[in-house]
Amino acid sequence: MRVLVTGGSGQLGHEVARDFEMQGHEVFAPTRQQMNLENPEEVASVARSCAADWVINCAAYTQVDKAESEPDKAFTVNRDSPAALASSVADYGGRLLQVSTDFIFDGTQTTPYAEHDRANPLGVYGQSKLGGELAVQEALPGATVLRTAWVYGIYGNNFVKTMLRVAASGNPLRVVNDQVGSPTWTADITAAILALVGKDKAGVFNYVNAGETSWHGFATAILEEAAALGFDIRTEVVEPIPTSGYPTPAARPAYSVLATDKIENCLDWSIPHWRDSLKYMLKELQTCADC
């Protein structure tokens, strides 16, 4: 099977491209120079020339705060280019999986968000990602949308690596404790993507690791697990602070937990708890030469 993976240099796209290749598929993961997501026409042209059986769109404008001052760029990358991808895929008869986000919800619920719950993004990033979902589904009704949240992995920049870097310096850590979600490892998301593709699933699905915590709880767990594995952890205390104590240009959902009942019926394995996956990620990070 031929697979086109966009965002192949990012933390999720890198894993997706690698794992599809490991399964023996022909994978094309274009660089930013080969496929400029700020140019939807170029995106469409590359997709048509590749004519992949499946397109896995991991590329996105993910700078949540910067999106507030760059809405045009965010919407071009997160809505218009996915629409161009979907239109091209529809023309030649392929399949597409669009990766989306918990930020399409406003976080006012106190129970996990299901796929059918009303979207109400708080800022430009969430609005642009929701726009991408809708545009993809309009151009390609048989598309697959996979929403995830609080993503981290061994590649790219993310919360886990930031906490490790700060903790190694011994600098104090102050982390928000009133935003709740499910930290989710890219390796597990990739496994979910492979399962959906392998079973030819269409529609909207949520995938996050099991369990929930706050950013403060996540940070505390990172330092505890990393110290147990022998990482250089010099920061001893993680101070909990409210969201109001760390103001940002973009509002964040206070509750970002996603319900995974639907996708669990498509998986041949149980969704791991977030803390178990964190341990595995840290072990892999210790031995990764190019991370």
Image: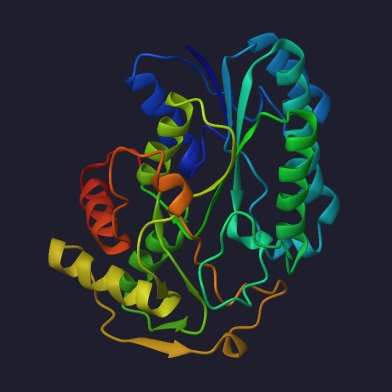
Between residue 37 and residue 183, name the one nearer to us: 183
Q: Residue at x 54, y 78 (%)?
A: 110
| Relative to 27, residue 109 above or below | below
Total tally of numbered discs in the picture:
0
| Relative to 177, residue 127 above or below | above
Q: Confirm whether residue 155 shows in the render.
A: no
Q: Is residue 24 left or right of residue 66?
A: left
Between residue 146 and residue 23, name the one nearer to us: 146
Q: Quadrant of residue 282?
A: bottom left
Task: Measuring from the top left, give residue 100's x and y in whole percent.
Answer: 61, 48
Q: Confirm whether residue 125 shows in the render.
A: yes
Coloration of the structure image: rainbow
Q: Residue at x 34, y 38 (%)?
A: 290
Q: Quadrant of residue 231?
A: bottom left
| Relative to 214, residue 121 above or below | above
The outermost residue toward the right is: 72
Instruction: Give the position of the C terminus as an image quadrant.
Output: top left
Q: Residue at x 80, y 30 (%)?
A: 40
Task: Measuring from the top left, give residue 208's x and y in whole percent.
Answer: 44, 55
Between residue 167 and residue 103, name the one nearer to us: 103
Q: Is residue 130 left or right of residue 237?
A: right
Task: Measuring from the top left, give residue 241's x and y in whole percent.
Answer: 49, 89
Q: Residue at x 68, y 71 (%)?
A: 106
